[in-house]
Image (cartoon, coloured by chain):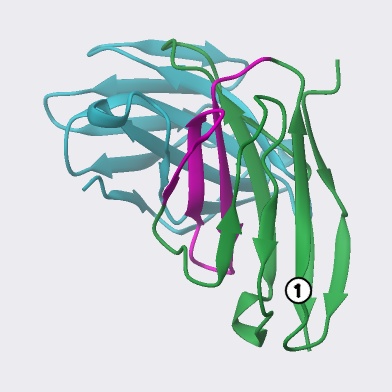
């Protein structure tokens, strides 16, 4: 049971480069979301999805795009990387049914130089 | 908009002592989560609390929820070094049915021998 799988685990980008962070879950969860974690700030929501074909912005969406073509996958695209996007990124999946935990991937540590 | 505040942000305690971490939230929350994070690792789910008066216990940790006071607590009993980690609470507003979580800033707990 893989749970939530994120790739890559580490990435260094140059300013202006683009890349996609991958996230896949095998639990058939309706909800998926992306968070970034910066020191002293907890986790902040970037984008989220309540089902295939449906996405919405979170608290800090600027500079990021998402799509959800399947239930399993929720990639996060950085369009033109900036040093301010240096962070640890976590993907999470959950279900609408209350009482069930939200599962997190192992994280992607991104450095933009 | 749901806001979540934790206190204290830093907690240094001796082994064998008891302490409580507090989590206040601003609006009606559908569910309240507690997570543990070790340095460089992902988030590990500890508890999901759904209803007023809910209490859950696992080992030396006990979480409770008071929806009227909009307060959740994480109580640590007879702390041991292995409990050293950062603890996050996160709420999900009723309007979004748990699709998006709002995190507190985290409480960095250090248990000293």
Quadrant in which the C terminus of chain A appears: bottom right
Q: In what element is the residue under mark 1?
A: loop
The magenta-colored residue range is A28-57
Q: Is residue B15 visible?
A: no
**Mark 1 — residue?**
A18
| Nearer-the-camera pick, A61 or B74 | A61
Chain A, chosen colour in render: green
x, y percent for residue A77: 68, 61
In reply to whether residue B74 is colored magenta, the answer given is no
> Splitting the image into 4 quarters, where does residue B54 fall?
top left
x, y percent for residue A60: 44, 64
In the figure, is residue B27 to the left or right of A13? left
Q: Is residue A61 visible?
A: yes
Residue drawn at (65%, 84%) of the image: A82
Residue drawn at (23%, 29%) of the image: B95
Chain B, chosen colour in render: cyan
Q: Chain of mark 1?
A: A
In the rendered image, the vertical position of residue B73 relative to residue B11, given as above or below:
above
> Splitting the image into 4 quarters, where does residue B64 fall?
top left
Name the dominant secondary structure of the magenta segment.
strand
In the figure, is residue B14 to the left or right of A100? right
In the figure, is residue A60 to the left or right of B68? right
Count neighbours of disc 1 (C-alpha within 10 A) and say few if under 14, some if 14 to 19, many if 20 or more: few
In the figure, is residue B14 to the left or right of A59? right
In reply to whether residue A53 is colored magenta, the answer given is yes
x, y percent for residue A12: 86, 76
Residue drawn at (44%, 39%) of the image: B89
x, y percent for residue A84: 60, 82
> Splitting the image into 4 quarters, where does residue A63 fall?
bottom right
Residue drawn at (77%, 19%) of the image: A26
């Amino acid at each position: 049971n893989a749970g939530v799988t994120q790739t890559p685990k580490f990435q260094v980008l140059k300013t202006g480069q683009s890349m996609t962070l991958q996230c896949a879950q095998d639990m058939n969860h309706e909800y998926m979301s992306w968070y970034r974690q910066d020191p002293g700030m907890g986790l902040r929501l970037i984008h989220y999805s309540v089902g295939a074909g449906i996405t919405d912005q979170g608290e800090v969406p600027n500079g990021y795009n998402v799509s959800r073509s399947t239930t399993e996958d929720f990639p996060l695209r950085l369009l033109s990387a900036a040093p301010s996007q240096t962070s640890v990124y976590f993907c999470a999946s959950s279900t609408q049914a209350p009482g069930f935990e939200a599962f997190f991937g192992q994280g992607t540590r991104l450095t933009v130089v | 908009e749901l806001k979540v505040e934790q206190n204290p942000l830093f907690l240094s305690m001796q082994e064998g002592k008891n302490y409580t971490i507090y989590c206040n939230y601003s609006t009606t929350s559908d569910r309240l989560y507690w997570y543990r994070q070790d340095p460089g690792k992902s988030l590990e789910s500890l508890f999901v609390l759904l209803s007023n008066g809910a209490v859950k216990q696992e080992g030396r940790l006990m979480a409770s929820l008071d929806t009227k006071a909009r307060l959740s607590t994480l109580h640590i009993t007879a702390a041991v070094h292995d409990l050293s980690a950062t603890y996050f609470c996160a709420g999900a507003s009723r309007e979004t049915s748990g699709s998006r979580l709002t995190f507190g800033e985290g409480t960095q707990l250090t248990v000293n021998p």
